[in-house]
Amino acid sequence: MRPLTTAELFQVWETGLDQSMASRALTLLQAANPELDGRALAALSVGERDGLLLTLREWTFGARLTALAACPQCQEQVEFEFEAKSIRAPALLPANPAAAERQPSGDGQPAQFQTVVAAAGGDPDRQNPVEVSFRLPTAADMVALAGAGVSAGIEPRTWLLQHCILSAASEGQLLPVTELPQAVIEAVVARMAELDEQAAVELALTCPSCGRQWAETFDILAYFWSEIQRWAQQILVAIHTLARAYGWREADILALSPRRRQIYMQMVTT
Ligand SMILES: [Zn+2]
């Protein structure tokens, strides 16, 4: 992966205008990873995707992030700042047992995992351990989920589980995925979260007004995209202003360094 030029980011923004948020993630990553096949990017787990987006955001707008959240108790708007590295989950190194669970996968195929769940609960027929084979939700799943491919009325979580749980068996007998006990489903969801930590980032916040502490979900994709939108508006104003003042072409204005663009803008507008 490499950083995007101003012109490339501007093009990504324009392409992304008509896309779902999930597709924008792939548009961004494809532009920054021109050497990679689109299928390889689509097969990234959501956490892997978000880890790359976080890196790209650091390269584009810096390592410091500022966000707003409403206190759940007093509704005060709390502004908070944090470093990108503080929300980066450790990578799945070979020494990590989770990495060892990965089955070898073909090119562009999501990695597969196995887990054994001791099916708890009162049902004596379900006391035997259930072996579940699953894969992690991918960037492609998120695109499908956002698109027309998912019929209305199906919960996103249910849809994801139906696609990500590949098989389940107890004592050699295959179990229909749609009939798995809730305890098994919950165990698989928890295992997915452990294996793909970057997919769900939570920030521990404290309200300065009332002292309430809570965990706020942080979505790097939505955050980064809203920054790109604000940035693109500024670029449009700069192109419009400088083109009119100096007669420069759009490509030339995009090729200016941010500092020089800003200095010319100040000279034209003051
Ligand atoms: Zn508060």
Image (cartoon, rainbow, N blue to C red):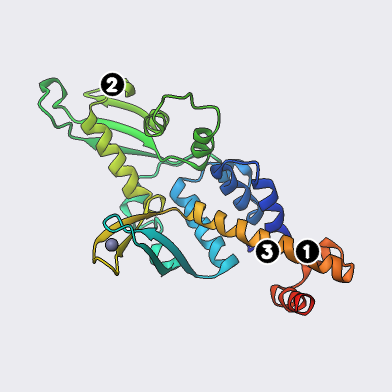
Density class for disc 1 (Cα within 10 Å; few <14, some 14-19, many ≥20) is many
Report if residue 34 is visible in the image: no
Give the side of residue 244 with respect to residue 66, left or right.
Answer: right
Q: Secondary structure at mark 2?
A: helix
- Find the distance from the CA under tag 2 to the CA under tag 3: 52 Å
Contact (Cβ within 8 Å) of mark 1 with mark 2: no
Front label number (1 vs 2): 1
Q: Amino acid at mark 1?
A: Ile
Residue at the image position 55 percent from the left and 28 percent from the top: 148
Report if residue 108 is visible in the image: yes
Density class for disc 3 (Cα within 10 Å; few <14, some 14-19, many ≥20) is few
- Say the numbered circle drawn on residue 179: 2
Give the x, y percent position of residue 11. Answer: 72, 53
Q: Which residue is mark 3?
A: 234
Q: Secondary structure at mark 1?
A: helix
Q: Which residue is mark 1?
A: 239
Among numbered discs 3 and 1, the one appearing first in the sequence? 3
Q: Amino acid at mark 3?
A: Gln
- Determine whether 105 is above or below 249 in the image: above
Density class for disc 2 (Cα within 10 Å; few <14, some 14-19, many ≥20) is few
Residue at the image position 78 percent from the left and 80 percent from the top: 267
